[in-house]
Amino acid sequence: MSDTAEETTRGEEFDAFYARTYPVLAARAVMLSGNRQNAEDAVQEAYIEAMRRWPHVRACASPEAWVDTTMRRKLSRDGRRWWFRWKPVELTVPAATTATVEETAEALAVLRALGTLPPRQRQVVVMHSLEGMSYAEIAAELGISTGSVGSNLHKARARLTLLLDLSWDVRPDGERLISADQLDPVCGALRGAAAWLRDGLGADRHIAQRRQALAARQGPTARKELG
């Protein structure tokens, strides 16, 4: 295969990878940060780094996990500059066109509840309850003790359980604010909101154009490295 043909093939591989994984990773970033612009910036930079190192990244057991980790570290690093100014804010995100009214209401309720958590609690509960990371993995990535992970997770889950009415005691009308997962209501709530965000962000973005913008931003050198 000629160099040009091989570069084209690798570029197409990255295009397909970007299109397949962007909505999922963008949704996770939004849930971690609570700020759509910060989330999209972190995801963009993670994909830029993946594009620069694509031969290495595509050889990983999970290229998606590589980009996910890079994105989380970017958010954590940048977050230290604005956490002291943190205050709850309303998050503006696109609704999935295929979502029902009930699904949209539930997802927005979860996102609003997440928005009331201090940044560290938010990070820990999303990393553990949504991404399935262990206490040790979270502690290593955030540079905190496993005890701090447990404390923040307990506080976050308690507040989400209260705000979202996730206790097993149903209200007098027999209804809950959101549908509860039989095994873990908090995990179920976070997964539902992440799926809703994924569908909305995926429909809201012109993914091919975004990838072209990444390549253009990096110039010929990066495009050569991609090959």
Image (cartoon, rainbow, N blue to C red):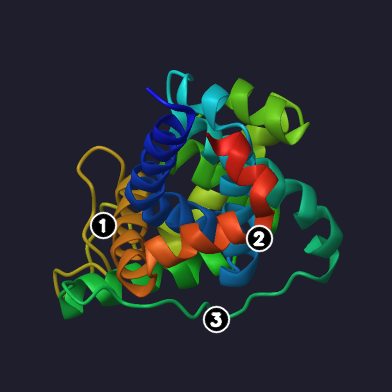
Which label belongs to residue 217?
2
Residue at 72% of width from left, 36% of height from top? Answer: 142
Determine which residue is flagged by label 3: 90
Residue situated in front as seen by the camera: 141 or 10: 10
Identify which amino acid the numbered label 1 is placed on.
Asp
Q: Secondary structure at mark 3?
A: loop
Residue at 39% of width from left, 47% of height from top? Answer: 15
Quadrant, the N terminus: top left
Q: In this rendering, which labeled residue sits more in front, label 1 or label 2?
A: 2
The answer to whether residue 163 is seen in the rendering is yes
Q: Quadrant of residue 85?
A: bottom right
| Numbered marks: total | 3
Outermost residue toward the front in this view: 2
- State if disc 2 and disc 1 touch (CB < 8 Å): no
For label 2, count other residues whose C-alpha is less than 10 Å away and answer few (under 14), some (14-19) or many (20+): few
Image side of residue 202 versus residue 83, left or right: left
Image side of residue 206 versus residue 117, left or right: left
Determine which residue is flagged by label 1: 169
Q: Secondary structure at mark 1?
A: loop
For label 1, count other residues whose C-alpha is less than 10 Å away and answer few (under 14), some (14-19) or many (20+): few
The answer to whether residue 50 is seen in the rendering is no
Residue at 31% of width from left, 77% of height from top? Answer: 95
Marks 3 and 2, how far apart in space?
31 Å
Identify which amino acid the numbered label 2 is placed on.
Arg
Marks 1 and 2, how far apart in space?
53 Å
Q: Reply above or below: 61 against 173.
A: above
Image side of residue 40 versus residue 12, left or right: right
Q: Earlier in the sequence, mark 1 or mark 3?
A: 3
Identify which amino acid the numbered label 3 is placed on.
Glu
Q: Quadrant of residue 79?
A: bottom right
